[in-house]
Image (spheres, rainbow, N blue to C red):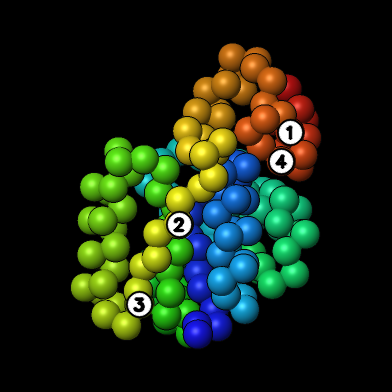
Amino acid sequence: MYKKAIYPGTFDPITLGHINIVEKAAKLFLEVLVAVADYTGKTTLFDLQERAELCRASLSHLPNVHVVTFSGLAVELAQKEKCSIMIRGMRAVSDFEYELSLALTNKKLSPEIETIFLVPSLRYMYLSSSMIKQLADLGSNLEDFVPAPVLKAFAQRK
């Protein structure tokens, strides 16, 4: 059995779908590192420290989950942390091509790291951070999509 897994992402912001994936991973591994990426390739709404703190607050109910931030490649962090399993969430067929390409690239960069895909519960299959930000911009109620710390963070930005 593997002891430690890493779940890297942007988490801008963390959603109930992300939390659902982490809860599933927390049942499978002794320790799960939620790794918040500094470089995302896109403009983020929340800065790195805000995103990490929102993850910590939202995942505090899981004692075997730890949040870290990182710069560079996720596989490099996995090697440093001695994680041989990388968790990726997959919501729909539309995610498959990107996630497969990413998993194969990571395998080429670090052959010892395996990628495991976890599927969120049906009620979270459609959630994405991008959609959440659009809904927030339009003044929509976000209670069914994000945890309380994220709701509070959006409220403070108004």
Give residue 72's quadrant in the image. bottom left
1 and 3 marks in contact (CB < 8 Å): no
Q: Is residue 112 above or below residue 158?
A: below
**Residue with the mark numbered 1:** 151
**Is residue 153 toward the left or the right of residue 104 in the image?**
right
Looking at the image, is mark 3 or mark 2 earlier in the sequence?
Answer: 3
**Is residue 23 toward the left or the right of residue 80 in the image?**
right
Residue occupying image coordinates x 77% and y 39%:
148
Nearer to us of marks 4 and 1 is 4
Looking at the image, is mark 2 or mark 4 earlier in the sequence?
Answer: 2
4 and 1 marks in contact (CB < 8 Å): yes
Count the numbered circles shown.
Answer: 4
Q: Which residue, as the protein is rendered here, is positioned at the far front?
A: 122
Residue 113: mark in rendering: 3
**Is residue 112 toward the left or the right of residue 122 in the image?**
left
Looking at the image, is mark 1 or mark 3 earlier in the sequence?
Answer: 3
Residue occupying image coordinates x 36% and y 68%:
115
Q: CA distance from mark 2 to mark 1?
A: 25 Å
Query: Where does residue 128 sit, x and y in percent of width and height?
Result: 49, 36
Nearer to us of marks 2 and 4 is 2
**Residue with the mark numbered 4:** 147
Query: Where does residue 76 sit, x and y in percent of width and height?
Result: 40, 75
Nearer to us of marks 2 and 1 is 2
**Residue with the mark numbered 2:** 118
Residue occupying image coordinates x 73% and y 64%:
62
Q: Amino acid at mark 3?
A: Ile
Q: Amino acid at mark 1?
A: Leu
